[in-house]
Amino acid sequence: MSLIKKIRRLKHPGVLRDFTWPSDLPAFGRFNLIYGWNGTGKTTLSRILRCLEKRTAPEGEVTLELDGLDVRHDEFSTATVPVRVFNRDFIAENVFPSKGGDLAPILVLGEKSVEKQKDVERLRGEHTTAQSKLDSARAIQQKAERDFDQFCINRASVIRDTLRSSGQNPYNNYNKTDFRGAAQKMAGGGDAQAHRLSGEDRDRLLAQQRATPKPKVQELAYALPNFEAIVARLSGLLRTTIVSAAIEALKADATLAAWTREGLRLHSERNADRCLFCEQPLPKDRLAALDAHFSAQYEQFMRSLDQFIDELQKSSEAASDLRLPKRAELYDDLAAEFEAAEAGLTQALKATREFLDSAVQALEDKKHRAFEQISAALQPPEVDAEAVRKLNAVIRKHNQACDEFHTRVNDARERLASNMIAEALEDFIRLRDAAQQATSAVQAAEQDVQRLEAAIANLEREIVEHRQPAEELNEDLRKYLGHDELNLQVKDTGYQLLRNGQVAEALSEGERTAVALLYFLKSLRDRQFDLRHGVVVVDDPVSSLDANALYLAFGFIRHRTQDAGQLFVLTHNFAFFRQVRNWFRHQKGQHKQDVNQRPARFYMLDQVQGANPRCTVLRALDPLLEQYESEYHYLFACVHRAANQAGESALERNYGLPNIARRLLEMFLAFRRPQIGGELWRKLKDVNFDEPKKLRIARFVHTHSHGDIVAEPEHDPSLLGEARAVLADLLELIKSEDPKHFEAMEGLVTGTTEEANLG
């Protein structure tokens, strides 16, 4: 059986602002009595326990200990302890709904339905098991769906972050729904492997989808020389020899021959008959000999060599001047292909220049050796004849990409997205199937629960008997009120309250309390609540009841709740408190020395001294309230302690004292001056005591005893600063009026005597 052991922690907007269960405060027992004046937090406690009954989160923050387990406010919805709470909220929701309506029915089984009830109980057992399986299946389903959903969210986030860009792009808003749909389609198609990319392709497509538009690049208008033709032509020239009347000296000295040939040309062009170098007459036979040496064939051959040299030099210059595109001018995804083609062409151009330069040098040598054959040692260079075409092919791809930029980028994104989906598809299918299997399990469990609920509902419709509980409530009302004017009538699925046969209206507070309390106590017999294993909470059940009704109410409460698994009674009414206290004190085992072994525990809600704003705390019941038969003992103790406390007292600590002092004085004078009726001051004037002190006492209790806040201008807050002195005067008045009584009471408070004659 689950019992409420402690209120571990409570932070509430009301007076229980920041409560922590004290280490020296005994845990709740089976029977628990909590005493507190109005405004000390009783309603707050009962509402918290009602939230536990309703499985809803209470206001503020609260942690309850249930059989050693801490249950936070946000875990109330999963708590299983059965609770029934009587408080003003119960009255509003169940007996006198604020929005109208009849009382809810209290279903009690009839003797004729025993067999059917056995069937119901059996089905309820099966329903509990089925509900447990359903709860477990739902938990598994929630986890599976949560894992699957989170996986789709994460994968969609990776795709979105990878493919997002400025401007319009469908992947900028890519979400779990998009991923789930695409993955589902790919899983159905069974072609995930076809969408996988190699690392090289992935890098290329990533660069492609990140690209920005670029201008087109001009293709190269260049062709490599025909190396074979050059070698053939060069070889032919090198093997050619000139036949002439060669002068041996010039034939053997190429430098001298070149110099002489140039000089002969100058002399011929100027018709000089004297040497332009030494100005000596030129021998006639010398010029003839030189003409024979430098024949027309020789000159023609030299021109052929010079022409070929010029062609080769221009071809070399064309190779040197050729401008190749820069890598940055092309899209990044073409970088690797471009660099390979560029390297091949660069190497080919270098080899071309070296080859042409060597050919030119060979021809220059031939010019000096025109009269002899020279073997051609030059070979065609080993270059990629397709180098220019390959580079131009890359340029064409770039230019085509410029024309198809958006299509190309979109295609890259789609291929990349498909690749990422294909990579995650195995996990997608696993998590999807797990979620689907969990959903199927939940549906099957739901059908089982629904089947059992339908069977139970069908039996319940057959065995419901409202008449018996209605008649029992009417009998309780008659005993409680002493008349039969009010009665309950069964209507549809609930009750309607009638007065003398008419719908009851304008009920008195006592009548409302009576109907509400009796209805609550009757509801404890509802088959939906297990009293022996449940928690019953009764908050101020005797509000607005006269003395006779109070004792009748106590009798009903005691009779109907004595078998409860755990009982909480909260009250501000001392007469009712005394009845409950005496009942609890006579429980079996209540006199055991160890308080933790006693079935009943006693507590009080008390104001925290010095707290601003005002707050209260749950603590053990003051011994004077627990041991003696009158509230008077407790009030006397409060006044005596305040009057004799050490040190200075903060003003806000005294706000509760005037009310305590007034109630103490009223009780004392009611006993000492029973013959004088009316206001307190009339009785006080009859007391033979120092007149100024009587006036100060009267002013103190009248001015400040009606609330915590001074509301009128003439209410001087400084009077509260005199609280200790005024309370001392009050004690002096009691002592002067009845010394023996005062001595006995003071002995009880200070612990100097165990027994006292109270006079």
Image (cartoon, grey):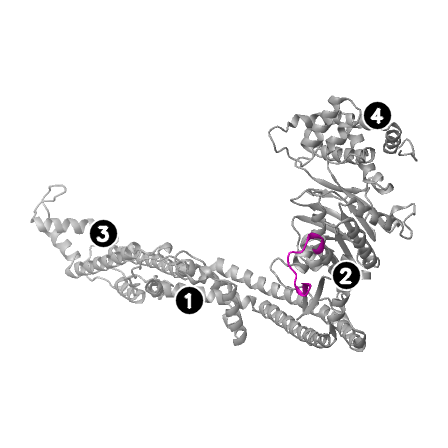
Q: Mark yes or no: residue 645 visible.
A: no
Outermost residue on the front side: it is 675
Q: Disc 1 marks which amino acid?
A: Asp
Q: Is residue 673 magenta?
A: no
Give the alpha-carbon distance from disc 1 to disc 3, as whole Å. Answer: 79 Å
- Residue 18 place in picture, x, y as percent: 69, 42
**What residue is disc 4 on?**
736
Query: Residue 499 falls in which quadrant of the image?
Result: bottom right
The amino acid pointed to by label 3 is Ala
Task: Name the amino acid, label 2.
Answer: Arg
Mark drawn on residue 249: 3
- Sequence order check, earlier mark of 3 and 4: 3
Residue 41 position in % (x across, y down)? 71, 45
Report the Cα–Cα distance between label 4 and label 2: 50 Å
Say which label, 4 or 2, has the lower sequence index. Answer: 2
Q: Are marks 3 and 2 in contact (CB under 8 Å)?
A: no
In x, y percent, where is residue 588? 91, 53
Q: Kindly identify which residue carries mark 2.
A: 478
Residue closest to the eye, 715 or 548: 548
Tag of residue 411: 1
Part of the protein shown in magenta: 496-511
Closer mark to the observer between disc 3 and disc 2: 2
Looking at the image, residue 442 lies above or below residue 521: below
Q: CA distance from mark 2 to mark 1?
A: 87 Å
